[in-house]
């Protein structure tokens, strides 16, 4: 189980789409500029999210990407798995381990993967967009770093 920039950027892009007025399509380059995502990388992510049925694309002058369903129906788990693959232990995988009878550690990794799935499944795009909106409205504060 490994989460990468694909998940981070994918979530950022979808939060951006969630806040689009009236659910209208948004050009990938606009999202890339606003969220600081490399444009070519974002295009790849959006293609994967389109194949997973999370976003839809529209061609033309007013085209772009929009959510395929309501933001409250899309979870962070669905997004991460569309971009990274299934969340399963990276150890104790079938055909990856030569311990035929298994081992006690397999229970740990299975429980960890389940906890990650549960945590990600508890976040919807609607919730993330609300959180982002609240953060965007909060006054910026700067806390000086201490040299130690």
Image (cartoon, rainbow, N blue to C red):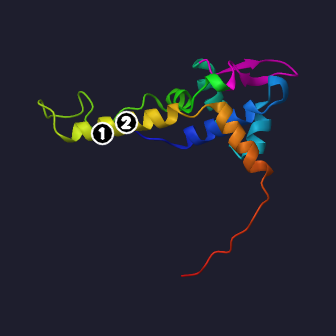
Q: Is residue 90 visible?
A: no
Q: Position of residue 36 (x, y in %)?
A: 71, 47
Magenta residues, as a range? 53-71
Q: Is residue 142 above or below residue 103?
A: below
Residue found 23% across the figure and 28% down from its top: 95
Disc 1, SS: helix
Q: Is residue 56 above or below residue 107?
A: above
- Residue 74 is labelled as none
Relative depth, front residue between 130 and 142: 130
Q: Is residue 141 visible?
A: yes
- Residue behind mark 2: 113
Q: How many marks?
A: 2
Residue found 71% across the figure and 44% down from its top: 132
Relative depth, front residue between 134 and 57: 134
Disc 2, SS: helix
The answer to whether residue 91 is left or right of residue 85 is left
- Residue 109 is labelled as 1
Distance from disc 1 to disc 2, alpha carbons, whole Å, reads: 6 Å
Mark 2, residues whose alpha carbon is within 10 Å: few (<14), some, or many (≥20)? some
- Residue, far bottom: 148
62 is within the stretch colored magenta: yes
User: Residues at badges 1 and 2 in contact (C-beta under 8 Å)?
Assistant: yes
Identify the image quadrant of residue 53. top right
The answer to whether residue 96 is left or right of residue 117 is left
Residue found 24% across the figure and 33% down from its top: 96
44 is within the stretch colored magenta: no
Q: Position of residue 18 (x, y in %)?
A: 73, 31
Q: Quadrant of the N terminus?
A: top left
- Residue, far left: 101
The answer to whether residue 109 is left or right of residue 75 is left
């Amino acid at each position: 189980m490994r989460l990468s920039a694909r998940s981070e950027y994918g979530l950022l892009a979808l939060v951006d789409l969630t806040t689009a007025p009236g659910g209208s399509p948004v050009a990938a380059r606009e999202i890339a500029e606003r969220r600081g995502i490399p444009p070519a990388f974002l295009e790849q992510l959006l293609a994967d999210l389109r194949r997973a049925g999370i976003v839809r694309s529209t061609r033309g002058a007013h085209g772009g990407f929009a959510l395929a369903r309501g933001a409250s129906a899309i979870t962070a788990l669905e997004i991460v798995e569309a971009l990274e693959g299934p969340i399963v232990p990276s150890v104790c995988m079938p055909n990856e381990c030569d311990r035929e009878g298994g081992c006690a550690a397999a229970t740990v990794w299975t429980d960890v993967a389940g906890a990650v799935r549960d945590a990600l499944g508890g976040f919807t795009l609607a919730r993330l967009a609300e959180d982002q909106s609240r953060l965007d409205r909060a006054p910026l504060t700067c806390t000086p770093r201490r040299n130690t």
